[in-house]
Amino acid sequence: MPDPRWGQRVAAVLQLHPTADGVTRQDLETHLAPLIARYKLPRLTHVVPRIQRSPSGKPDYRWATETLLKAARDA
C-alpha cells in the first residue's frame, strides 16, 4: 500500500480457509512473528471471499492494491 512517509507499507489481502472461523489480527501476528521480521508484518489486513488471480494463475496484484485501498478508505 502507498504510504506518505515510507513510500510503501505492508498490507495483506487474505482468503481464509473455510474452517478458520474467528481468526483475528492478533492470531495472524502471533503466527507470523517467529517466521518473519516485525517490520514485515502487515499493518492492514482485509479478508475477502476469494483472491483474484490472472489467467496464468498468479495473484492479481493490481486487484489486491485496489481492494486494500478501498478497504482503507471504508475503515
Image (tube, rainbow, N blue to C red):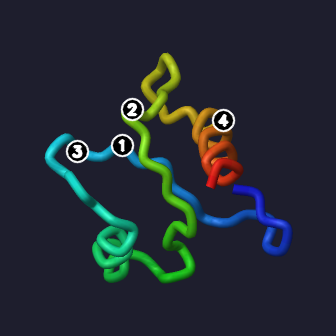
Q: Kindly identify which numbered label has been placed on residue 17.
A: 3
Q: Is residue 73 above or below residue 34?
A: above
The kind of residue tagged 2 is Arg
Alpha carbon distance from label 2 to label 4: 15 Å
Alpha carbon distance from label 2 to label 1: 6 Å
The kind of residue tagged 1 is Gln
The kind of residue tagged 4 is Arg
Tag 2 residue: 50
Rendering coords of residue 42 (x, y %):
52, 67
Horizontal relation, residue 13 to residue 24: left or right: right
Closer to the camera in the image, 31 or 71: 71
Answer few, some or many: residues within 10 Å of disc 2's Cα (few below 14, many 20 plus, some between 14 and 19): few
Rendering coords of residue 11 (x, y %):
57, 59
Horizontal relation, residue 2 to residue 29: left or right: right
The kind of residue tagged 3 is His
Residue at 48% in and 27% down: 53
Alpha carbon distance from label 4 to label 3: 23 Å
Q: Quadrant of the N terminus?
A: bottom right
Q: Residue furthest front?
A: 74
Which secondary structure lies at badge 3? loop
